[in-house]
Image (tube, grey):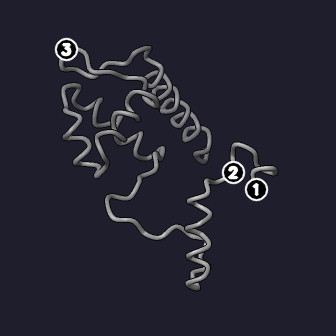
Amino acid sequence: MIETLGEHAPSYATVKNWVARFKRGDFSTCDAPRPGRPKTLTTPEIIDQIHELILEDHRISAKSIAEQLDISRERFRSIVGEDLDMRKLSAKWVSKCLNADQKRQQCQSSEQRLEFFSAPSK
């Protein structure tokens, strides 16, 4: 394996555990369920919900939003920092570059135009 995979080869201990599991008759290649909170994916819906909550109240706490949406505070911080490009400044959430707000406004105006033009004419 080392000749084929090089530095990406699994360790000797990992291979030893695999062999022991195969000898016991465990041929499953799926990960076993683990205790603890499952990982949540960052979906556009969650990002939009967080953005709406922040726009409603710029002073809302990270803990409050995380509890309302049932996500971890780490996931919340990741979404706010990376996806929404916002940060907390003087107890208020503010955009770093207004990118998320500008995108949202553009999306809303585009949706309004689409509704206007796809409505049946009288």
How far apart are the alpha carbons under marks 3 and 1? 55 Å
The Cα atoms of the two marked residues, 3 and 2, are separated by 49 Å
The residue that appears at 33% across and 38% down in the rendered structure is 76
At mark 2, the secondary structure is: loop
Residue underneath mark 1: 1
**Res 95 → quadrant:** top left
The 10 Å Cα crowd at callout 3, few under 14, some 14 to 19, many 20 or more, is few
Whether tag 2 and tag 1 are in contact, CB under 8 A, the answer is yes
Instruction: For the residues labelled 3 and 1, say whether their Cβ atoms are less than 8 Å apart.
Output: no
Residue 51 drawn above or below residue 89:
below
Front in this rendered view, residue 56 or 99: 99
Amino acid carrying label 2: it is: Ala
What amino acid does circle 3 point to?
Answer: Ser
Q: Would you say the residues marked 3 and 2 are in contact, meaning their CB atoms lie under 8 Å apart?
A: no
The residue that appears at 57% across and 81% down in the rendered structure is: 26
In this view, the mark in front (3 or 1): 1
Provide the residue designation for mark 3: 90
Circle count: 3
For the residues marked 2 and 1, what is the alpha-carbon distance in whole angstroms?
A: 6 Å
* Mark earlier in primary sequence (2, 1): 1
**In this rendering, would 83 be left or right of 52?**
right
In the structure shown, which secondary structural element does the residue marked by tag 3 occupy? loop
- 113, 54: nearer the viewer: 54
In depth, the one of 5 and 31 nearer the eye is 5
The crowd level at tag 1 (other Cα within 10 Å; few <14, some 14-19, many 20+) is few
Residue that badge 2 annotates: 9
Q: Going from the N terminus, do you reach mark 3 or mark 2 first?
A: 2
- What secondary structure is marked by label 1? loop
Quarter of the figure with the C terminus: top right
Q: Earlier in the sequence, mark 3 or mark 1?
A: 1
